[in-house]
Image (tube, helix red, strand yellow):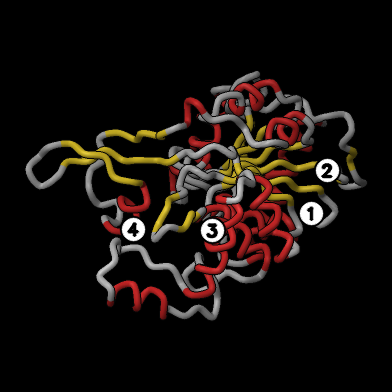
């Protein structure tokens, strides 16, 4: 289920920009689409969106609060997942990392006893992090580095990090003695498998971060703003938490359409639509399991059709 709200609010859907036109079927065409995306879910949705609207100009604002420095290399998991997925280099089996990957570097690091051992970088993937780290150390901002990396993959979208500033998500948990401590989100997700109760989510550096160049313009000037199936707290939430971005979303004249990351049965879908609509949010229940590109393209089309319907 996904929905839009005609009020000026984060969940809001307001009138679409006049520059977007409707085709004979009432669909928006020639669109400028802006997408706030996390990792696997966001990247998967984007692949369907590109197929559904190949004529659209798509800008992706990627989450960078999952970023981490490992073995001296700056790793940007969500940006890389979007880049590899849309560039045709993603591992289809894992949904993250490179295809046809090798693990010699990981094995050698383990042989040296280098920590952490719970996060492995594949041999092909290491090349991306080496280039990124080298450019960052040379003084290039992350947005420029991301553009350079994406140029190799010839993406059908423009990928922008949410901020050039360093932002990292940490999770507060209890250790074996019951004392509270903070661990990086990657450790919580990869090593602990998110099985340890979380007391608090702390996004370090977010309050002082600035939106990367092009982020606010992409939100202000788009015809539809899409929130794909991504974690609402540590993916979309961290993007919106960068000062200035939430305000830009509230002020945009574009429809804001959110696609639920939650899939369920019974009262979790169609029966909840009246409840959502009672809150003033236009909603539509559709199958949301992104099993393949065609199915995902259909979901993306439904989201854009909802935006067009509200506009009409």
Residue drawn at (62%, 32%), measured in percent from left and top? Answer: 211
> Which of the numbered marks, if any, corresponds to residue 278?
none
Q: CA distance from mark 3 to mark 4?
A: 24 Å
Which of the two marks, 3 or 1, is nearer to us in this view?
1
Locate the N terminus and report the quarter of the image it occupies. top right
Q: Is residue 101 above or below residue 200?
A: below
Q: CA distance from mark 2 to mark 1?
A: 9 Å
Which of the two marks, 3 or 4, is nearer to us in this view?
4
Residue 285 visible somewhere in the drawing: no
> Which of the numbered marks, if any, corresponds to residue 289?
3
Q: In x, y percent, where is residue 159?
A: 68, 50
Quadrant for residue 259, please give it.
top right
Q: Are marks 2 and 1 in contact (CB under 8 Å)?
A: yes
Q: Earlier in the sequence, mark 3 or mark 1?
A: 1
Asked whether 139 or 290 is in front, the reply is 139
> Which of the numbered marks, if any, corresponds to residue 31?
2
Q: Are marks 3 and 1 in contact (CB under 8 Å)?
A: no
Q: CA distance from mark 3 to mark 2?
A: 25 Å
Q: Earlier in the sequence, mark 3 or mark 4?
A: 4
Asked whether 205 or 190 is in front, the reply is 205
The residue beneath circle 4 is 190
Q: In x, y percent, where is residue 128?
A: 57, 64
Q: Earlier in the sequence, mark 4 or mark 2?
A: 2
Q: Is residue 186 above or below residue 32?
A: below
Q: Earlier in the sequence, mark 1 or mark 4?
A: 1
Is residue 220 rendered to the left or right of residue 17?
left
Residue drawn at (79%, 36%), measured in percent from left and top? Answer: 223
SS at mark 4? Answer: helix
The residue beneath circle 1 is 53
């Amino acid at each position: 289920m996904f929905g839009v709200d005609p009020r000026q609010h984060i969940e809001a859907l307001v009138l679409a920009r006049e520059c977007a036109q409707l085709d004979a079927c009432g669909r928006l065409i020639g669109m400028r689409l802006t997408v706030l995306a996390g990792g696997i879910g966001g990247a998967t949705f984007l692949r369907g969106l590109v197929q559904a609207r190949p004529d659209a100009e798509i800008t992706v604002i990627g989450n960078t609060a999952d970023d981490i420095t490992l073995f001296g290399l700056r790793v940007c998991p969500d940006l890389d997942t979007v880049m590899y997925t849309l560039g045709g280099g993603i591992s289809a089996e894992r949904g993250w990392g490179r295809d046809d990957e090798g693990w010699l570097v990981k094995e050698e690091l383990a042989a040296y006893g280098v920590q952490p051992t719970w996060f492995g970088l594949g041999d092909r993937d290491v090349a991306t992090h080496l280039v990124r780290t080298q450019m960052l150390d040379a003084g290039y901002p992350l947005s420029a580095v991301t553009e350079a990396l994406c140029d190799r993959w010839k993406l059908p979208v423009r990928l922008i990090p949410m901020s050039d500033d360093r932002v990292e998500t940490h999770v507060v948990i209890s250790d074996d003695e019951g004392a509270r401590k903070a661990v990086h989100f990657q450790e919580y997700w990869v090593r602990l498998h998110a099985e340890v109760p979380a007391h608090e989510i702390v996004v370090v550096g977010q309050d002082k971060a600035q939106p990367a160049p092009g982020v606010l313009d992409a939100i202000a000037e788009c015809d539809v703003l899409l929130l794909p199936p991504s974690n609402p707290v540590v993916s979309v939430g961290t993007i919106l938490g960068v000062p200035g971005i939430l305000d830009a979303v509230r002020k945009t004249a574009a429809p804001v359409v959110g696609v639920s990351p939650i899939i369920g049965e019974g009262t979790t879908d169609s029966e909840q639509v009246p409840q959502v609509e009672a809150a003033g949010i236009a909603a539509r229940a559709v199958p949301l399991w992104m099993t393949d590109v065609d199915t995902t393209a259909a979901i993306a089309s439904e989201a854009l059709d909802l935006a067009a319907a509200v506009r009409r």
